[in-house]
Amino acid sequence: MVKNIKYNVSFRVWIYSGENKFLGIGRVELLERIKATGSISNAAKEMKMSYRQAWQMVTEMNQRSNYPLVEKQLGGKGGGGTIITPAGIKAIETFHELENKVRLFIENETEKFNL
């Protein structure tokens, strides 16, 4: 009897700065939500994480990057907010590009197991 078993491989991409985590899918999601909401607090709420944890992640990413990824905007009529810098947008895009390339590579290689 021939079985029709399909195999797959799961993975997570982490980018490190030295030995410290710089970017992963959770941090990229945080950046994307900050970009969409203009607020670390709102992004944290959407991700069901504390503001403190989100702020710590942003601080670590900014420290481990050549350029800040996230910057605070001082108040004005509507108050302050938070923006994703051009370096932050580039980091998001580059991470997704890398993740997609790795996914395609793994999918192609996994096909070799389907004997």
Image (tube, helix red, strand yellow):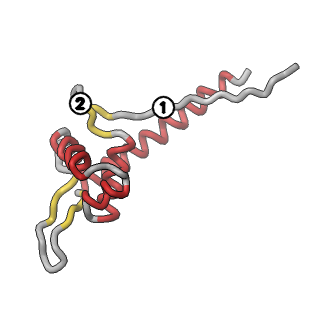
Quadrant occupied by the N terminus? top right
Residue occupying image coordinates x 31% and y 40% = 23
> In the image shown, does 79 or 96 lie closer to the viewer?
79
Identify the image quadrant of residue 16: top left
Question: Of the numbered discs in the image, which one, if any, rests on residue 20?
Answer: 2
User: Mark 1: few, some, or many residues within 10 Å (few <14, many ≥20)?
Assistant: few
Pinpoint residue 54: horizontal percent, then vertical percent.
25, 49
Quadrant occupied by the C terminus? top right
User: Which secondary structure, mark 1?
Assistant: loop
Residue type (three-letter) at the residue carrying disc 2: Asn
Contact, mark 1 vs mark 2 (Cβ under 8 Å): no
Count the labels in the image. 2
C-alpha gap between disc 1 and disc 2: 19 Å
Relative to 48, does residue 104 appear above or below in the rendering? Answer: above
User: Which secondary structure, mark 2?
Assistant: strand
> In the image shown, does 14 or 80 lie closer to the viewer?
80
